Image (cartoon, helix red, strand yellow):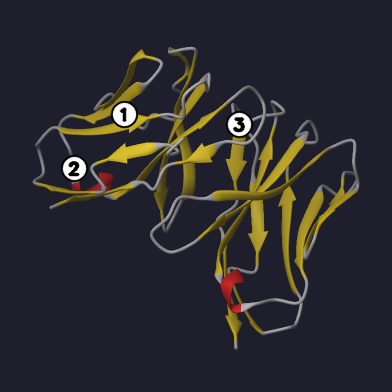
Amino acid sequence: GENVEQHPSTLSVQEGDSAVIKCTYSDSASNYFPWYKQELGKGPQLIIDIRSNVGEKKDQRIAVTLNKTAKHFSLHITETQPEDSAVYFCAASLSGGYQKVTFGIGTKLQVIP
Amino acid sequence: DAGVIQSPRHEVTEMGQEVTLRCKPISGHDYLFWYRQTMMRGLELLIYFNNNVPIDDSGMPEDRFSAKMPNASFSTLKIQPSEPRDSAVYFCASSYGQVEAFFGQGTRLTVV
Protein backbone atom coordinates (compact mmCIF):
# COMPACT_ATOMS: atom_id res chain seq x y z
CA GLY A 1 0.00 0.00 0.00
CA GLU A 2 0.87 3.67 -0.05
CA ASN A 3 3.33 5.07 2.51
CA VAL A 4 3.52 8.80 3.21
CA GLU A 5 6.41 10.26 5.18
CA GLN A 6 6.24 13.80 6.52
CA HIS A 7 9.01 16.07 7.85
CA PRO A 8 9.61 17.77 10.18
CA SER A 9 7.41 16.56 13.00
CA THR A 10 7.66 19.95 14.73
CA LEU A 11 8.51 23.36 13.33
CA SER A 12 8.90 26.71 15.06
CA VAL A 13 9.17 29.93 13.08
CA GLN A 14 9.08 33.62 13.87
CA GLU A 15 6.03 35.52 12.79
CA GLY A 16 6.53 36.78 9.26
CA ASP A 17 8.97 34.04 8.29
CA SER A 18 8.19 31.21 5.88
CA ALA A 19 7.45 27.62 6.83
CA VAL A 20 8.03 24.57 4.65
CA ILE A 21 6.72 21.08 5.28
CA LYS A 22 7.86 18.19 3.09
CA CYS A 23 6.27 14.86 2.26
CA THR A 24 7.26 11.86 0.21
CA TYR A 25 5.04 9.08 -1.06
CA SER A 26 5.84 5.59 -2.22
CA ASP A 27 3.22 4.66 -4.84
CA SER A 28 3.79 6.36 -8.20
CA ALA A 29 0.10 5.79 -9.01
CA SER A 30 -1.00 8.32 -6.38
CA ASN A 31 -2.71 11.19 -8.14
CA TYR A 32 -4.25 13.47 -5.52
CA PHE A 33 -2.45 15.27 -2.69
CA PRO A 34 -4.49 17.24 -0.14
CA TRP A 35 -3.12 19.20 2.80
CA TYR A 36 -5.09 19.53 6.00
CA LYS A 37 -4.79 21.89 8.96
CA GLN A 38 -5.94 20.72 12.39
CA GLU A 39 -6.40 23.22 15.19
CA LEU A 40 -6.53 22.09 18.79
CA GLY A 41 -9.75 20.28 19.61
CA LYS A 42 -11.03 20.41 16.05
CA GLY A 43 -11.19 18.13 13.06
CA PRO A 44 -8.80 18.49 10.12
CA GLN A 45 -9.73 21.08 7.53
CA LEU A 46 -8.61 21.12 3.90
CA ILE A 47 -6.40 24.11 3.12
CA ILE A 48 -5.10 23.26 -0.34
CA ASP A 49 -4.82 20.30 -2.67
CA ILE A 50 -3.04 19.42 -5.87
CA ARG A 51 -3.58 16.79 -8.53
CA SER A 52 -0.86 14.94 -10.35
CA ASN A 53 -1.27 16.85 -13.61
CA VAL A 54 -0.15 20.09 -11.92
CA GLY A 55 3.30 20.95 -10.56
CA GLU A 56 2.39 23.90 -8.36
CA LYS A 57 -0.68 25.55 -6.89
CA LYS A 58 -0.97 28.74 -4.88
CA ASP A 59 -3.69 30.25 -2.72
CA GLN A 60 -2.73 33.55 -1.11
CA ARG A 61 0.02 32.77 1.43
CA ILE A 62 -0.11 29.03 0.88
CA ALA A 63 1.48 27.09 -1.98
CA VAL A 64 2.01 23.44 -2.72
CA THR A 65 4.55 21.95 -5.10
CA LEU A 66 4.64 18.44 -6.52
CA ASN A 67 7.57 16.56 -8.02
CA LYS A 68 6.15 13.35 -9.46
CA THR A 69 9.51 12.04 -10.56
CA ALA A 70 10.95 12.25 -7.08
CA LYS A 71 7.60 11.52 -5.43
CA HIS A 72 7.92 14.61 -3.26
CA PHE A 73 5.41 17.30 -2.43
CA SER A 74 5.72 20.29 -0.16
CA LEU A 75 3.62 22.93 1.58
CA HIS A 76 4.92 26.47 1.73
CA ILE A 77 3.42 29.10 4.02
CA THR A 78 4.74 32.62 3.60
CA GLU A 79 4.42 35.57 5.99
CA THR A 80 3.37 33.29 8.80
CA GLN A 81 0.94 34.55 11.43
CA PRO A 82 0.16 33.25 14.93
CA GLU A 83 -3.14 31.84 13.66
CA ASP A 84 -1.17 29.55 11.35
CA SER A 85 -0.11 27.60 14.46
CA ALA A 86 -1.65 24.13 14.13
CA VAL A 87 -0.88 20.58 13.05
CA TYR A 88 -0.59 20.13 9.30
CA PHE A 89 -1.13 16.82 7.53
CA CYS A 90 -0.17 15.86 4.02
CA ALA A 91 -1.89 13.00 2.26
CA ALA A 92 -1.68 10.97 -0.93
CA SER A 93 -4.54 9.28 -2.68
CA LEU A 94 -4.60 6.46 -5.21
CA SER A 95 -8.21 7.06 -6.14
CA GLY A 96 -8.28 10.75 -6.94
CA GLY A 97 -10.43 11.30 -3.87
CA TYR A 98 -10.62 10.12 -0.27
CA GLN A 99 -11.41 6.49 -0.90
CA LYS A 100 -7.79 5.40 -0.89
CA VAL A 101 -6.04 8.16 1.02
CA THR A 102 -3.02 7.80 3.28
CA PHE A 103 -2.11 10.62 5.67
CA GLY A 104 1.31 11.66 6.88
CA ILE A 105 2.00 11.67 10.61
CA GLY A 106 1.59 15.44 10.88
CA THR A 107 3.75 18.53 11.53
CA LYS A 108 3.11 20.73 14.55
CA LEU A 109 3.77 24.29 13.44
CA GLN A 110 4.31 26.99 16.04
CA VAL A 111 4.47 30.61 14.93
CA ILE A 112 6.17 32.74 17.56
CA PRO A 113 4.85 36.32 17.75
CA ASP B 1 -25.33 23.43 6.95
CA ALA B 2 -23.85 22.81 10.40
CA GLY B 3 -21.15 20.56 9.02
CA VAL B 4 -20.43 16.99 10.06
CA ILE B 5 -21.80 16.38 13.52
CA GLN B 6 -20.37 13.75 15.82
CA SER B 7 -21.53 12.60 19.21
CA PRO B 8 -20.51 12.29 21.90
CA ARG B 9 -17.50 14.64 21.93
CA HIS B 10 -15.93 12.69 24.78
CA GLU B 11 -16.51 9.16 25.96
CA VAL B 12 -14.93 7.41 28.91
CA THR B 13 -15.77 3.76 29.34
CA GLU B 14 -14.52 0.69 31.12
CA MET B 15 -12.75 -2.10 29.33
CA GLY B 16 -15.19 -4.67 28.05
CA GLN B 17 -18.07 -2.25 27.59
CA GLU B 18 -19.76 -1.52 24.29
CA VAL B 19 -19.13 1.90 22.79
CA THR B 20 -21.17 3.51 20.03
CA LEU B 21 -20.01 6.61 18.20
CA ARG B 22 -22.42 8.56 16.05
CA CYS B 23 -22.12 10.71 12.97
CA LYS B 24 -24.41 12.91 10.93
CA PRO B 25 -22.83 13.76 7.57
CA ILE B 26 -23.41 16.92 5.57
CA SER B 27 -26.68 16.74 3.70
CA GLY B 28 -26.24 15.70 0.09
CA HIS B 29 -22.85 14.12 0.55
CA ASP B 30 -22.56 10.60 -0.86
CA TYR B 31 -19.38 9.43 0.85
CA LEU B 32 -18.87 8.90 4.56
CA PHE B 33 -15.54 8.00 6.17
CA TRP B 34 -14.53 6.88 9.66
CA TYR B 35 -10.98 7.67 10.78
CA ARG B 36 -9.02 6.96 13.93
CA GLN B 37 -6.28 9.33 15.13
CA THR B 38 -3.53 8.36 17.55
CA MET B 39 -0.15 9.90 18.32
CA MET B 40 1.68 6.81 17.14
CA ARG B 41 -0.18 6.04 13.93
CA GLY B 42 -1.67 9.39 12.96
CA LEU B 43 -4.90 9.41 10.93
CA GLU B 44 -6.02 5.99 9.75
CA LEU B 45 -8.98 5.30 7.50
CA LEU B 46 -11.13 2.60 9.09
CA ILE B 47 -14.03 2.26 6.68
CA TYR B 48 -15.95 4.24 4.11
CA PHE B 49 -19.45 4.17 2.68
CA ASN B 50 -20.78 5.28 -0.68
CA ASN B 51 -24.50 5.94 -0.87
CA ASN B 52 -24.93 4.19 2.50
CA VAL B 53 -23.17 1.02 1.32
CA PRO B 54 -19.91 -0.06 2.98
CA ILE B 55 -17.27 -0.17 0.26
CA ASP B 56 -13.97 -0.80 2.01
CA ASP B 57 -13.57 -1.89 5.61
CA SER B 58 -9.99 -3.10 5.28
CA GLY B 59 -8.87 -0.51 7.81
CA MET B 60 -11.10 -1.84 10.57
CA PRO B 61 -8.60 -3.25 13.07
CA GLU B 62 -10.58 -6.20 14.43
CA ASP B 63 -13.95 -7.87 14.45
CA ARG B 64 -14.69 -5.93 17.63
CA PHE B 65 -15.22 -2.92 15.36
CA SER B 66 -18.34 -2.55 13.23
CA ALA B 67 -19.93 0.33 11.35
CA LYS B 68 -23.35 0.90 9.90
CA MET B 69 -25.06 3.51 7.81
CA PRO B 70 -28.81 2.84 7.92
CA ASN B 71 -29.63 6.00 5.95
CA ALA B 72 -27.97 8.95 4.25
CA SER B 73 -28.01 11.09 7.37
CA PHE B 74 -26.68 8.76 10.06
CA SER B 75 -23.81 6.39 10.72
CA THR B 76 -22.48 4.57 13.75
CA LEU B 77 -19.15 3.04 14.68
CA LYS B 78 -19.41 0.42 17.39
CA ILE B 79 -16.69 -1.21 19.44
CA GLN B 80 -17.67 -4.30 21.39
CA PRO B 81 -15.96 -5.17 23.66
CA SER B 82 -13.77 -2.09 24.08
CA GLU B 83 -10.12 -2.32 25.11
CA PRO B 84 -7.66 0.30 26.43
CA ARG B 85 -5.75 0.24 23.13
CA ASP B 86 -8.88 1.53 21.41
CA SER B 87 -8.38 4.88 23.13
CA ALA B 88 -8.06 7.48 20.37
CA VAL B 89 -9.89 10.31 18.66
CA TYR B 90 -12.37 9.02 16.13
CA PHE B 91 -13.34 11.26 13.24
CA CYS B 92 -16.19 11.03 10.82
CA ALA B 93 -15.89 12.83 7.48
CA SER B 94 -18.14 13.20 4.47
CA SER B 95 -17.66 14.28 0.89
CA TYR B 96 -19.54 14.72 -2.32
CA GLY B 97 -17.80 12.67 -4.97
CA GLN B 98 -14.07 13.12 -5.32
CA VAL B 99 -13.82 16.58 -3.79
CA GLU B 100 -13.03 17.87 -0.33
CA ALA B 101 -13.75 15.68 2.67
CA PHE B 102 -15.22 17.62 5.60
CA PHE B 103 -14.34 16.33 9.03
CA GLY B 104 -16.39 16.45 12.20
CA GLN B 105 -14.90 17.60 15.47
CA GLY B 106 -14.20 14.06 16.57
CA THR B 107 -15.00 11.86 19.53
CA ARG B 108 -12.25 11.40 22.09
CA LEU B 109 -12.58 7.86 23.42
CA THR B 110 -10.85 6.76 26.58
CA VAL B 111 -11.10 3.13 27.63
CA VAL B 112 -9.94 2.50 31.19
Q: Which residue is mark 2?
A: B83
Q: Disc 3 on helix, strand or loop?
A: loop
Mark 1 against mark 3, which lies toward the viewer? 3
| As drawn, A77 above or below B26 | below
**Dot 3 and dot 2 residues touching (CB under 8 Å):** no
Same chain for mark 1 and mark 3? The answer is no
Report the amino acid beneath label 2: Glu
Circle 3 chain: A
Circle 1 chain: B
- The crowd level at tag 3 (other Cα within 10 Å; few <14, some 14-19, many 20+) is many
Q: CA distance from mark 3 to mark 2?
A: 28 Å
Same chain for mark 1 and mark 2? The answer is yes
Rendered location of residue B57, percent (x, y): 44, 22
Q: Which residue is mark 3?
A: A98
Report the amino acid beneath label 3: Tyr
Rendered location of residue A33, percent (x, y): 73, 42
Q: Which residue is mark 1?
A: B62
Kindly identify which numbered label has been placed on residue A23: none
Q: Which is more toward the observer, B34 or B8?
A: B8
Report the amino acid beneath label 1: Glu
Circle 2 chain: B
- The crowd level at tag 1 (other Cα within 10 Å; few <14, some 14-19, many 20+) is few
